[in-house]
Structures are given as structure tokens and as C-alpha cells.
Image: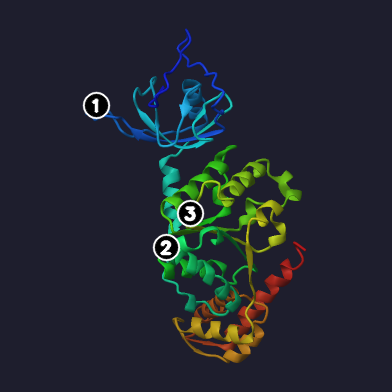
Amino acid sequence: MKSDNKKQEMKSANSKPVIKDNENKDYAELVVVKPVGYPFEFNLMDEDIEITNTKLFEEYAREQWLGLEVCEKSHLFDQKIIPDYGFEIVTAKPNNSIISEKTKIKIITDELNKLNDKSKIKSKLLLSDIVGQKNAKNKVKVITKYLENPETFGPWAPKNILFYGLPGTGKTMLVKALANELDVPLYLIKATSLIGDHVGDGASKIHDLFKKASENSPSIIFIDEIDAIALHRSFQSLRGDVSEIVNSLLTEMDGISENESVITIGATNNPTSLDYAVRSRFEEEIEFSLPDDEERLAIIEKNLKTMPLKYDLDLNKIAKLTKGLSGRDIKEKILKTALHNAIANDSNMIVMSNIDYAIKSTKIKNQDIKGMFE
């Protein structure tokens, strides 16, 4: 393979490039490439290639590109199996460095591009649709102001925010509503989807995610269940690649890549389980609390508006009976279970006996799991 930069490739007798002795160039730690096709069009040539084994590709590419200088946005070309087929250098860490025998080489495949496209979502939710969480809605006003006019903030720009609270309290709903009202791209992903099959995959996915968000800025990255990739160090022995993933996440959160107009929001049910280094990068932690009596009543009334059956219910009583439940639990475990119970009993109306059945079922389930993770 050859490079399109101005440095001339030096080859030994066996036609392999020789690593250059250049005191001003560092060795590359990571190079990320993507296939871009041939530099010219010819009917007998197929522009598309399929990489079935990324680990094998890494060894194949490193052997041929050994000693070449890599610069982002330039290209490398294959000269063996598919001569003159081009690969764009998406990332070189550090930039303008030399490929060595220890350089990790990753390729962006169509599957990864589809992952990034799927992670960018649109929502019709509004902040007014979220019942309660007044404190959280007040605190995200700074995000609104920043993304509406990023250039005025300069070094005071918000970058990393942590949402924490029990499941079902509205963390994901709030970020969807925020992105919708601001009309900015939202990259919403589960942290577990960033974990790769091989060492280095996780770090590459994190970098690609932030790069994609930066290219479409202003934008919001929402990493749900962030503790899955940013465990406290006391748990890191459970995952061999966690250190690499955490380091990559820290690099992006520190803004080394200058992700301008990109807000990173992490979400966790338990902030104490986070690695301290990651947690310290969040300039603010916003708590999502369980709804109080009035908020539970509002949640019940809001959800009953779309109920497919008629109902005859004591809403104030239900609000008191559901104390300690999140908004999602009220909808999914109480109202939906009551609806299904009414239908199962051939009833055209939801009554309090259906609610009692749902509450009893929920209490049994909660009792079964109480204390499991304490």
C-alpha cells in the first residue's frame, strides 16, 4: 500500500516499507480509516468491499502501511489484493505520526455508520409533557441558552452534565424533549452498545460517536446507563477492557478533540458506582426525584387521556396508593396492568378492582427483589 502524502516510501528487499528515523514524528497509537473506493471509475471495478474480520484486516493493513506517515483527511491505498483502492484516514492519534508495529488500525464499516445513524433520533416530546422535575428543567436552561447561541459562551460553555435518579423518573424523556425543542440532533445510545467484541473496539466507537456529533453540531450526546462503561475502579477487575474505554471517554469529555457545540449528558441510576475520574468531568449533576402526591395525580390524569377503555376510578386514592413509584412505573405497572386485567375479564371499563390487582402484583414483585443489590 502507499500513501498520498509527499513523503516517499522507503522499501527493503522484501518490498516492505521501512520505519523512518524521524525525530520530529511520533509513532501512531491509533489510526481509524474508512473505505472510499478507487480514485477513478472503471466498469469492471467494484467500489464496495466487505470486511468480515476486522482483526485480520488490522494485521493485513499494518504490515503494508508500516513506516508510513498518517495525516487526518489524507488517504492510504492498497497495492496487494485490491490495488489502488483508497482508505481515508479519519483519525490519527497523534496526527502526523508514523505507523509502527504497535499501532492499532481500525476500520469504519457500514455497520458502524448505521449504528451512528440509528443513534441519531427525533422526538415529538416537549418539556411541558414532563410532569414534575422542576429542578431538572430549571437546570437544563443553561444547555438551552448555550446551544441557541454557542459562540457567546466561550470557555464558560457547558460540556458534560450528569443525570441521576431512580429508573423511570424522566431522564431520557427530558433529553428527548430538550433536543426536540432546540431542533438539534440527539445521539441517544445505551452505554453497552459502545462495548466492542475486541480490545480497541470500544475506544474506537466512542471516538466515532463524538466525531459524528461534532460534524453535526450543535448536538447532544446522551449516554444512558453510563456506569456500564465507566465503572468505579473497585469494579474494574470485572471487565478487562474497561480501562481503555474509560480513557477514551475521558479524552472526549476533556475536549481534546475540540467538540464545539456538543453537549454530553450521561445518565445513571447510581452515581456512586461511577469511576471517579469520569464523574469528576461532569461539571454538574442533576437529580431526578420520585413524584410527590400532586405529581403522581397529574401523571395518572395525563395517561388516562389516551386509555382505550372507559374508566371509573378514584384518582386521588390511586395517587396515594402509588407512593414511591416512578412515573414510568405508574403507567407501565399500574395503569397498563389494570387495563390488561380489565380486558382479560371481558370488561369494557377499568374500575378500582383492576387497580387493586395491579398494585398487589407490583408489591409482590418489589418485595421479591427488595434488598438484592443493597
Label 3 residue SS: loop
| Rendered image: mark on residue 260 | 3
Locate residue 351 relative to residue 81 in the image: left or right: right
Locate residue 116 relative to residue 351 in the image: left or right: left
The nearer-to-camera label among 1 and 2 is 2
Give amino acid for label 2: Val
- From the top left corner, tell me how far across and down residue 170 is, in percent: 56, 71
Label 1 residue SS: loop
Q: Residue at x 48, y 75 (%)?
A: 127
Residue beneath disc 2: 184
For residue 247, above or below residue 169: above
Q: Residue 7: name its quadrant.
A: top left
The nearer-to-camera label among 1 and 3 is 3
**Quick one: label 1 or label 2, which is nearer the N terminus?**
1
| Rendered image: mark on residue 254 | none
Locate residue 225 relative to residue 369 in the image: left or right: left
The nearer-to-camera label among 2 and 3 is 3
**Quick one: label 1 or label 3, which is nearer the N terminus?**
1
Q: Residue at x 31, y 33 (%)?
A: 47
Viewer-nearest residue: 371 or 61: 61
Give amino acid for label 1: Leu
Label 2 residue SS: loop
- From the top left corner, tell me how far across and down residue 115 is, in percent: 45, 49
For residue 266, above or below residue 28: below
Crowding at dot 3, Cα within 10 Å, few <14 / some 14-19 / many 20+, comes out as some
For residue 208, above or below residue 10: below
Q: Residue at x 40, y 66 (%)?
A: 183
Q: Residue 24: name its quadrant.
A: top right
